[in-house]
Image (cartoon, rainbow, N blue to C red):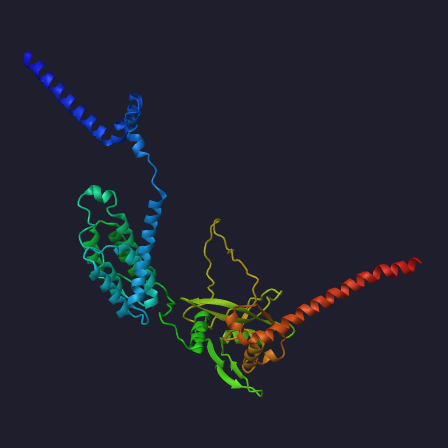
Amino acid sequence: MKCVRCLLQLQSLRLLGQSTRCSAQYSSLLPSASSQPGLPHSTQQQVSRSFHSSSACSKSRPVPTDFLKDQDGKKDKSLVVQKDLFEEVAKDIKTKATFNKVVEVFTKRDVRRRGHVEFIYAALKKMPEFGVERDITVYNKLLDVFPKEVFVPRNFIQRMFNHYPRQQECGVQVLEQMENYGITPNVETKVLLVQIFGDRSHPMKKYQRIMYWFPRFKHTNPFPVPRQLPEDPVDLARFSLTRIANDLDAKVTVYQVPFTDVSESGEDITCPHIVGIQSPSQMELLAQHNPSRPVFVEGPFPLWLRNTCVYYYVLRADPTPEEKKEEPYDPERCFDYPLQLDIDLERDLGDDEEFDVEDLDEGPVYAMCMSGQGDQATLNQWISGLQQTNPILGQVPTLFRLDSGPRDLQGPAETESGPRHQTDTETHNQSREEVQDEEAEEPRRTQGMKQ
């Protein structure tokens, strides 16, 4: 019992010593309050008590706005610094060599690769300017900027909680840009992703999805568009019209090649190109057209070829109100694939002989063309060129239903199309004034009859 008492006394003395030390420390922190003789003892105790605060108050202390502004400014400055790096190294010439030089300058500047995420984001935005957005070696060089074996998860908990999410999102963004430009990763890409993020990371899953779907959809398009479109407008129009036409026997005709001429007054006149297409079946339909019914030139209609938009015009007619007459099949037309089979088969009550076919009220299309200008004068030249192979166009009235269209198609024809629109508005205003005059004359006539 005496030993227990001794231990308790020693423990109480130790606690007393610690409390005296703490009071000495607090008194040293407040020399001014305790040294003034005029202050009463109660005020000294109030000053010392003001230092005691709970942990909740310390946690809920607001963060100053200046600190948050500084942090946001640092993020913005980091992106600006990376963009300035591209502008400093590659001022005038923007090629693949200069882009690789910028990447090498960044990797050699710091061993720890500080700010590598901001640099990769800035590089992805600058790639189209340098013309390297479709180069797999440049993407592998960007992935090589990441530090190796730093972001690899070491256990299942790190894998579960998305180890280093900011760096993984940046790696996924690099692969997504490759996917958008249709670039298939190679073995070097896989090795870099395993070294940087591990074999069970989000960028590695993105790589596996790309390698699963890209080979399956790479050659599924039966009408592929080449990467490099022809720069010559005539060749581009020929390629576009053959792509639109649904007949392999359709013939492309160049009615006019773009050239520059000098007028009598000495002004330079640029004549646009005119390229048309027509199939033999369309020529037969146009030959059977009723001359009393007009044909229409409509357009422009857009056609997108990758990042290039071209416009075409069509020559069409309204649908005939008469019902179509079914022509009898010729049994000797094709012996290998007969067009009609007279076979009596037993039919059930569930068999339906009628087909649900939706008839569209669209007229036949007789020809198509592409032109550098969308004015009526240029399209008149196309119609006059069609008359050489389709003489019926000389007897059929032709009406133009042209939209305003893009500015690049109108060009110098704006001066010609402007007065035409003015005349339409003038005639509309004249007719409106005539109607108003007639309405004003009617009450006058009635008043005269009453008198």
Is residue 175 visible in the rendered image? The answer is no
> In the orientation shown, which residue stands out farthest toward the right?
451
| Left or right, 440 with reference to 273 | right
- Rendering coords of residue 312 (x, y %): 50, 71
| Left or right, 238 with reference to 438 | left
Relative to 281, does residue 342 appear above or below in the rendering?
A: above
Taking depth in this image into account, of 367 and 426 the one nearest to the observer is 426
Point 48% across, 83% down: residue: 259
| Left or right, 297 with reference to 126 | right
| Left or right, 129 with reference to 420 | left
Which quadrant of the figure has residue 127? Answer: bottom left
Is residue 34 visible in the rendered image? The answer is yes
- Rendering coords of residue 308 (x, y %): 43, 68
Q: Quadrant of the N terminus?
A: top left
Taking depth in this image into account, of 26 and 191 the one nearest to the observer is 26
- Rendering coords of residue 298 (x, y %): 56, 69
Which quadrant of the figure has residue 383? Answer: bottom right
